[in-house]
């Protein structure tokens, strides 16, 4: 320091530090002018070391650094043309991300047929992406674009916390999906994950994410820097007990832990899971000839796995450059002073945040049910029409009342029409999904009937105008009679699931 800083500046900064930290009773500022360079440097070191706690020590270091190595002008200012281009790029990305994930939220929560185990995980993923886009990406972009944090200390803490929580939740949800798909495909005889268990898993995911992000609540802070030209800027950062980036080892260790737990290990786990699933779905050969139902089930499982492989691959591609950039910047501090560092950081940050935009597009592209709902709401927005909810209780009640006032034939046709109006592809994706149930009931001797069987067949006609019917077969009489219609849907593995009255 003694060779770089002018002696007069060194003395003046020492006087300012004594006044700033109220050390007049300890240091006589009138005698500072008579001290040599070595004695002044020693006095500055004692001022820093005699602070009460680490936070005040870091404050003293920042004050002296800004005084001894001042910036004549405010750095990192982009021309307005470049700011406009970046604003358009980020604006389009955030609009698609917020709108797309909002639609996914509406599709799953507003339609009972879409509330499957897998879709609950996708719903959680969309919630995390929606929070990231609306509560974190917008404010971080403004901060990076202008190199100034105008949102205060409280939201600086919230912003850092939300950033880590949403990223952790997203990747942990992807890991949970891979485990669920692995059990369903590699170990099909094991008990499937129930909806109640899924809710518990999602709560644990959010809790673990909050624990990992807790340091952001403790160490987030802001600092205002002033410059000779009268300008100033405020920065939002993490002030650790041993300082801040790039000198803090605690900051480096925390970011390294986050990188390993939210990227490194999850990517390895998901790679193993999907490799094993791929070997079962594409690499194995069954003995004998598969039935039509087995072939349809295999095709359905392959489609689902392809979609999740695409989601995981996009996640890995979007976040890898961002993580590599920060690892490189930690070990090469001169990167922060390069001419195009702001454009580099904005580009890597946009790529990472665009993952929230891509996920709804993947659902639309690779899932028939999501695509039908997306197309319906897009068409409604384009033509400016408003439509009632497709499966509202009022619509179902109207259908039931009308069925009581008409004949059996009229009831059947009315039920078919109302089903198509109130349910969008509630029937299975494939037309060959079926459920067969048989029940044997031992009757007392001489009762005349000793066996009854119920067969629920899910067959959709070629025109797609009907939904499954449940038929009753009385073997003792040999007659087939239509009984109360039950609605049966298929889960994501093409297995039939009977819906309860509340779900219909």
Image: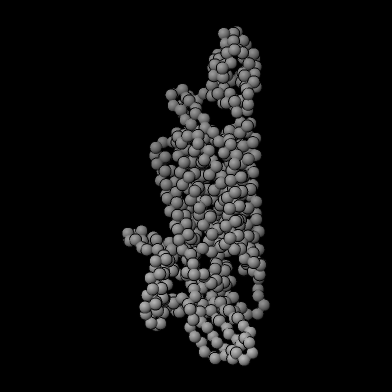
- Whether 402 is drawn above or below 6: the answer is below
Q: Position of residue 260 (x, y in %)?
A: 64, 47
- Residue 388 seen in the figure: yes
Q: Say which of 296 and 464 sits in front.
A: 464
Q: Say which of 372 and 442 sits in front.
A: 442
- Whether 242 is drawn above or below 345: the answer is above
Task: Specify how the rendered protein is coloured.
Answer: one colour
At a point 58% along the width and 35% down the height, the residue shown is: 219
Outermost residue, left side: 384
- Residue 429 seen in the figure: no
Q: Say which of 114 and 337 sits in front.
A: 114
At a point 61% along the width and 52% down the height, the residue shown is: 204
Q: Position of residue 161 (x, y in %)?
A: 55, 42
Q: Is residue 127 left or right of residue 417?
A: right
Q: Position of residue 198 (x, y in %)?
A: 58, 59
- Whether 28 is drawn above or below 20: the answer is above
Res 375 → quadrant:
bottom left
Q: Position of residue 110 (x, y in %)?
A: 45, 61
Q: Which quadrant of the rendered structure holds the N terminus?
A: top right
- Whether 286 is drawn above or below 163: the answer is below
At a point 49% along the width and 44% down the height, the residue shown is: 136
Res 492 → quadrant:
bottom right
Res 247 → quadrant:
top right
At a point 32% along the width and 59% down the height, the residue shown is: 384
**Number of disc labels:** 0
């Amino acid at each position: 320091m003694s060779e770089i800083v002018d002696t007069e500046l060194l003395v003046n900064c020492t006087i300012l530090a004594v006044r700033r930290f109220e050390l007049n009773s300890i240091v006589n500022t009138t005698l500072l002018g008579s001290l040599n360079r070595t004695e002044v440097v020693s006095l500055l070191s004692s001022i820093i070391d005699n602070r009460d706690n680490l936070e005040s020590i870091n404050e003293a270091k920042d004050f002296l650094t800004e005084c001894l190595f001042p910036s004549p002008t405010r750095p990192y200012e982009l021309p307005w043309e470049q700011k406009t281009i970046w604003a358009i790029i980020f604006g389009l990305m955030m609009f698609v991300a917020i709108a797309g994930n909002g639609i996914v939220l509406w599709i799953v929560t507003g339609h009972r047929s879409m509330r499957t185990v897998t879709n609950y995980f996708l719903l959680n993923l969309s919630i995390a992406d929606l929070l990231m886009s609306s509560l974190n990406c917008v404010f971080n972009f403004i901060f990076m674009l202008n190199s100034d944090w105008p949102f205060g200390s409280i939201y600086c803490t919230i912003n850092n916390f939300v950033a880590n929580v949403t990223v952790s939740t997203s990747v942990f949800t992807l890991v949970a999906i891979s485990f669920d798909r692995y059990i369903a495909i590699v170990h099909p005889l094991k008990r499937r994950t129930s909806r109640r268990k899924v809710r518990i898993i999602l709560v644990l995911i959010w809790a673990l994410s909050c624990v990992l992000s807790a340091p952001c609540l403790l160490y987030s802070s802001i600092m205002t820097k002033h410059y000779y030209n009268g300008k100033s800027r405020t920065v939002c950062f993490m002030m650790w007990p041993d300082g801040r980036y790039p000198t803090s080892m605690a900051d480096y260790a925390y970011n390294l832990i986050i990188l390993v737990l939210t990227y490194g290990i999850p990517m390895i786990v998901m790679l193993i899971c999907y490799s094993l699933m791929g070997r079962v779905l594409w690499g194995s050969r069954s003995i004998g000839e598969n039935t039509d139902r087995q072939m349809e089930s295999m095709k359905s499982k392959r489609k689902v796995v392809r979609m999740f492989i695409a989601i995981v691959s996009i996640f890995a591609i979007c976040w890898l450059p961002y993580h590599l950039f920060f690892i490189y910047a930690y070990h090469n501090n001169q990167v922060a002073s390069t001419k195009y560092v702001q454009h580099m950081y904005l580009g890597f940050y946009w790529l990472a945040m665009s993952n929230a935009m891509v996920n709804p597009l993947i659902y639309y592209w690779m899932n028939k049910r999501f695509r039908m709902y997306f197309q319906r709401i897009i068409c409604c927005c384009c033509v400016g029409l408003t439509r009632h909810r497709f499966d509202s209780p009022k619509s179902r009640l109207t259908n039931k009342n009308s069925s009581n006032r008409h004949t059996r034939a009229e009831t059947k046709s009315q039920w078919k029409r109302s089903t198509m109006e109130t349910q969008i592809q509630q029937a299975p994706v494939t037309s060959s999904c079926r459920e067969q149930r048989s029940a044997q009931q031992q009757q007392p001797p001489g009762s005349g009937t000793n066996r009854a069987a119920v067969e629920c067949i899910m067959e959709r006609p070629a025109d797609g105008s009907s939904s499954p019917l449940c038929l009753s077969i009385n073997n003792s009489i040999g007659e087939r009679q239509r009984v109360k219609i039950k609605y049966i849907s298929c889960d994501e593995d093409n297995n039939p699931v009977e819906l309860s009255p509340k779900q219909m």
